[in-house]
Image: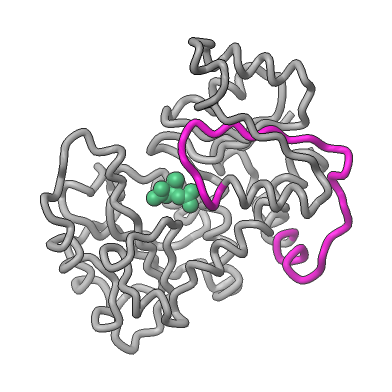
Amino acid sequence: MQHLVDTNDFTDQQIQDLLRDAKAFKKQTPPKLLHDKLLITLFFEASTRTRSSFEVAAKRLGASVVHLDPSRSSAKKGESLEDTFTNLCAMEPDGIIVRHHLNQTPQDLANMHTTPIINAGAGNYAHPTQALLDLFTMVEYFGTQVRGKTIAIIGDIVNSRVASSGIRLLTRMGMHVVLVAPPQFMPETSLPQYKTLEEVIDSVDVIMSLRAQLERHEKEIFEDYDDYAQQYCITPERIGERNILLLHPGPVMRNIDISDAMLDDPRCRVLTQVKNGVFMRMAILKLLLLDS
Ligand code: NCD
């Protein structure tokens, strides 16, 4: 039984297979490979893109999906996560897609060895399907040349599971990762660090902007996000004519993370990421439910 807790669960060959399958699924509607499969989603945190992307991916491959909304489940009556999970497993799904505020939850559930676990975002530690869809989006643009390209991750890096999974996967794939953030948002790391984008902008091929994770801040970090935006918002003025690919996992805080004008710029690939997310998740479901 194979799980996806983080991208290091996959071999290099499996990552290449995922990129190949995602590309093929994007090119041509695939047959209903998963027509006899049933998935359950169990999201303890809010989600727009990830949950619907998994559902669309599963349905495009013919699988059925059942959503359990923990805010209306027996979790509200005091049932433990493990008991909720064990009860769902008794219904014999082919996999459970889980999002949780604790870093450890997907691994804890995987350790129970009852059904394949797919991590849809855990704490500030891992969001492997986002990292893989971001990789797919960059490979689609750069081809094998993605190796050796430089990506600047900018924003609330310390609180971002997208950043932590991305850093692990993209460095493994041979990309140079540099971090741009105010001190409050910078993790402890051996990666190159910059306080401003201007210091590094002439040597980057990709910018990944991140949302300030207000819900994870124990106390208010910036009194005024306009001040933050002055320095870190991605605008056409800041990027100039440079040929830089702009990514963001969403939700984008308009005019704080990325300006309205930049969101409309063809170099901004936020909606391509969303589109590619479906194809990459189709590839991931195929790998975990069919090929493993
Ligand atoms: C992110 C998440 O929830 O980790 N969004 C996503 O899944 N695409 C990032 C965020 O909430 O800022």
Q: Residue at x 35, y 62 (%)?
A: 209
Q: Which residues are magenta?
A: 21-50
Query: Is 107 above or below relative to 189?
Result: above
Query: Is 258 above or below relative to 223?
Result: below
Q: Residue at x 17, y 67 (%)?
A: 231
Instruction: Say left or right for 28 vs 3.
Output: right
Does the rendering let one see residue 73? yes
Most foreground residue, 276 or 49: 49
Q: Residue 216 is drawn in which quadrant? A: top left
Most foreground residue, 191 or 245: 245
Q: Residue at x 12, y 62 (%)?
A: 227
Most foreground residue, 76 or 273: 76
In the image, is residue 31 part of the stretch drawn in magenta? yes
Coloring basis for residues: one colour
Q: Position of residue 206 (x, y in %)?
A: 41, 70
Q: Residue 72 is drawn in which quadrant? A: top right
Q: Position of residue 80 (x, y in %)?
A: 52, 12
Most foreground residue, 116 or 2: 116
Instruction: Say left or right for 59 vs 230.
Output: right
Q: Position of residue 21 (x, y in %)?
A: 75, 59
Instruction: Say left or right for 236 vs 123.
Output: left
Count of all numbered marks drawn on residues in the image: 0
Q: Quadrant of the C terminus?
A: top right
Query: Is 1 above or below relative to 289?
Result: above
In the displayed image of the protein, which residue is found farthest to the front?
72
Q: Residue at x 42, y 62 (%)?
A: 248
Q: Quadrant of the N terminus?
A: top right
In the image, is residue 289 part of the stretch drawn in magenta? no
Does the rendering let one see residue 162? no
Instruction: Say left or right for 171 vs 115.
Output: left
Q: Residue 220 is drawn in which quadrant? A: top left
